Image: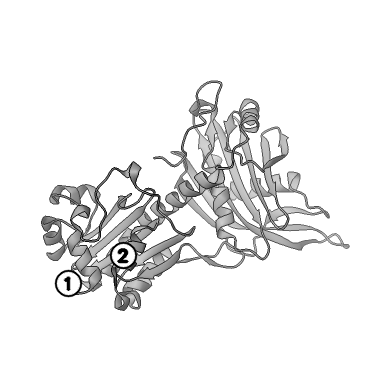
Amino acid sequence: MTSIRLHTLLRIAKRSLLICALPLAIGCSDVQYRPSAIGKSGEVVVVMDSTLWNGPSGAALREELGRYIYTLPAPERLFDLDHQTLNSEATFNRVKARTNVVFAASLSDSTAESDFMRSVFSPEARSAIEQGRRVFLQRDDTWRRGQKIFYLATPTRNDLIEVIREAGPDMRSVFNAAERARLEEEMFDKGRQHNLEDSVLAQHGFRVKVQHDYLIATDTTKFVWLRRILQDTWRSLFVYYEDYADPMTLTPEWIYRTRDSLTQTYLEGNVGGYVAIDHRRPLEAENIDFLDRYAFEVRGLWHMIGPDDDGNIVSYGMGGPFVTYAFYDQDSGRIYLVDGMVFAPNFKKREFLRQLEVIAHTFRTQSELEPGKIARAETSFSR
């Protein structure tokens, strides 16, 4: 049995979601007139019967969405999961206001969640599910603007475990992109340093959005380092590029060597030493699509190292997480390395690092922008 993706479901359903027919639903007004969805950063609400949540289906969801991130100094969940049941109208109204929501139920059950799912799908879609189809369907702005919702419906409880596994990569991708989009709006609400962005664009042929309190620590040939320094934390993003590059050189090993070479040259500590990848902990390297480019995403930990009194290279005890995007830009013939790094002792790191992901995803080359000016009204995650 295979999942029915959105395009297939639309062929068999008169209306995929009968939102107007739900007793507790708001009217089907235009999205622009709905209030914005609310919720904590990095949180996903899971609406599921308690027996499912405490059983294999709940465990599968926790493994797909609540898995630990081991490339942080102390492991944190990918998403914080808030389990809810449809035990009252008040609970349902709270769920309808949230940003990221997953509804999961077996249509053979007689729970409130199953009743809700049966009301969501058209008779044709519901019949297909009851006859053995597994469905996961994603919808935007169902009750509020900026909302991402997944509906996971299956004929039996055992099927639900399988569809959770199948939907996992899509859910992670959609929720991650949504979190970055919301965070981008929040980060640049206080303003951007357009003059600084224009200067980098003119000198280097690329641009990233720069928050109001970032400064340029280093701006030299093929290397730009931006920093945000607060009392207890700092965040860092640097961009390096190579002209006339061979895309075949782009490998995880090249990224490790290049990053360490750059940080040893440019990222020195206040009391000596320099930044390097901490190879004592696992690194994660993955092929991704980065802004429509073939790329590698590397995650791991950095630490400050340097010589001791005997000249041996040792750790100075300072470190944190980093994320690096390395990709080949065909129009310019360049390899770019965009790196975000966090130092935040005594704080959780996931959302700090996500801020650097947001800035990295605002990367644009000269050829992607209108000649001579920056498209200041663009939205990086609109697609």
Dividing the picture into quarters, in which one does residue 304 lie? bottom right
Dividing the picture into quarters, in which one does residue 266 lie? top right
Residue in the picture at 65% in, 28% down: 199
Does residue 291 appear in this view? yes
Left or right of residue 105: residue 252: right
Label 2 crowd (10 A; few <14 / some 14-19 / many >=20)? some
Left or right of residue 321: residue 142: left
Looking at the image, is mark 2 or mark 1 nearer the viewer?
2
Numbered disc 1: secondary structure? loop
Residue in the picture at 17% in, 72% down: 108
Query: Which quadrant holds the N terminus?
Result: bottom left
Residue marked by disc 1:
108
Instruction: Depth check: give the residue in front, 20 or 381.
Output: 20
Mark 2 or mark 1, which has the lower sequence index? 2
In the image, farthest residue toward the right = 309
Instruction: Depth check: give the residue in front, 368 or 349.
Output: 349
Left or right of residue 260: residue 2: left
Residue 215, x across and y down, in percent: 70, 41
Amino acid found under the numbered disc labelled 1: Ser
Instruction: Depth check: give the residue in front, 46 or 75.
Output: 46
Label 2 to label 1, Cα distance in Å?
21 Å
**Image mark for residue 53:** none
Residue marked by disc 2:
92
Instruction: Depth check: give the residue in front, 5 or 211.
Output: 211
